Amino acid sequence: MSAPAPNARRTFAIISHPDAGKTTLTEKLLLFGGAIHLAGEVRARGNNRRARSDWMKIEQQRGISVTSSVMTFERGGITFNLLDTPGHEDFSEDTYRTLTAVDSAVMVIDAARGIEAQTRKLFEVCRLRDVPIITFVNKVDREGRDPFALLDEIADQLALDVVPLTWPVGMGGQFRGLYDLRAHTLTLPEGDSRTSGRVVPLTGIDDPALAEFVPADELATFCEQAELALGGYAELDPDLYRKGALTPVLFGSALKDFGVGDLIAALAAYAPPPRVQHATPRDVTPDEPAVTGFVFKVQANMNPQHRDRIAFFRVCSGRFRRGMKLKQVATGKMIAINSPIFFFAADREIADEAFPGDIIGIPNHGVLRVGDTLTEGEALTFTGIPNFAPEILRRVRLGDPTKSKQLRTALTDMAEEGVTQLFRPMIGSQWIVGVVGQLQLEVLISRLDAEYKVDAGIEPSPFDTARWIAADEPAALKSFVDQHKSAMAEDRDGAPVFMARDQWELNYTAQRETAVRFTATRERA
């Protein structure tokens, strides 16, 4: 098989605030891309179908995404690698690491709510990484805000130029369809469910044929809005979009299939192919012949019957072939990749080869970790994949003392995935887990029970916050550790961590100990 054209990959993430419709949109993208034949109803309960991208028990029970998943589909000769991220802010670490592996993002906004807190946070992460964004305003078939107010909010709050590509003809109870401002077509609702149906070609917004589908009083309002949308915003500049200064905006309803095809077409036309990836001592371009890439996620027990452990690997350059031996730069060991896989949510197939932009799964037993760089031999390290200091510290209470070994295995597994941080105090034997949000603790307990058959609970920790510490002089670091042993721990790499009872103690100690650096993030060396 020859290598695909350089522009034949689109690797993108979907970001949003919870309940904006992200998982529904993911399902419909897969449906339109031909990857599935029946989209799951995200709100389904009981024995009904579950969302295809939500495969964990807790995800299926709550109807939310709590872990990133990867899905691949093809359309129009382009391979789309879709990374579905958790919308809930308690899982922002997983989302941040996932955004290191994409070349662009789709930002989903609820038409009634506009820009929400988590949307803004995720957007800022994209901005830090120069990830270009296409905006999808969802749920226009329900009562929502004025489209111009939504565009103004995006422009003002996110400091972006906005370019609408489609426009809703009415909203909520008066929703008559979706108008393509460039192709001048009208997509109409059909059937009892009023899903996306017939596409009517028109000559423009002044085409008399529009009157057949839109009542006269509503038509005047639509024509006025469409004229303003066409004349009041800049033309789409692909370069400005790829620099992160401009966002194309599409309106639609993922649940009713409106705008999903338009979104795929926009990704194909405008979203960047695989980009240059930052590394030390040099950046890596996708056209280099040698294979390089990095692990941005590890997931255990996607198939609990096999106790599997999968490293998600972003190919950055070269043509990867099944059976290759790649160097794990952190350890210097060569690893044979004999059974790489492509993902479709929890389903998978063997990957005989992969190209820049592709995400493959590498089955392993704890050998590969988040942040690992793999190359054909060159000593490169991809940067920007950090661990974050936890905001909540707790101890895990074991229900059955005979299961202590299983608990240690489970906690280590989930720490390697990035579900939690795991700290071993220098004094005392009880492990401390750290998380960003409360819901992570619920996921931890749920997975201990479902995947490891460990009955456990959460109890308070004597500490409130943690920071990694370092110093230019080894003697200064040793002196600090010796003086604060009761507050010291090690992370899973053995790096020293200072545990504080509250923020005041952390600030006081950091101000006093000027020879020691206290950091809230840490990249694996």
Image: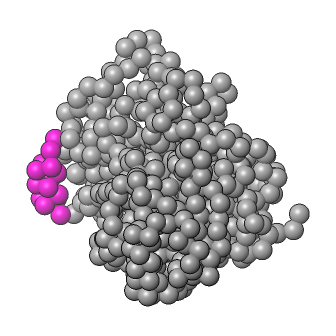
Determine the residue positioned at 19% across, 33% down. Answer: 462
Q: How is the image coloured?
A: one colour
The residue lying toward the viewer, choosing from 104 and 320, is 104
Determine the residue positioned at 53% across, 71% down. Answer: 211
Where residue 262 sits in the image (x, y, percent)? Answer: 60, 66
Residue 373 is a magenta residue: no
Residue 494 visible from this viewpoint? no
The residue lying toward the viewer, choosing from 155 and 448, is 155
Number of marks: 0
Residue 512 is a magenta residue: yes
Residue 19 visible from this viewpoint? yes
**Over which residues does the magenta segment extend?**
501-514
The residue lying toward the viewer, choosing from 283 and 79, is 79
Determine the residue positioned at 44% across, 70% down. Answer: 216
The residue lying toward the viewer, choosing from 377 and 443, is 443
Q: Quadrant of the N terminus?
A: bottom right
Determine the residue positioned at 59% across, 74% down. Answer: 209
Residue 63, compared with residue 513, is above or below; it is: above
Where residue 273 sits in the image (x, y, percent)? Answer: 64, 73
Where residue 224 sits in the image (x, y, percent)? Answer: 40, 80
Quadrant position of residue 439: top left
Residue 350, compared with residue 286, is above or below; it is: above
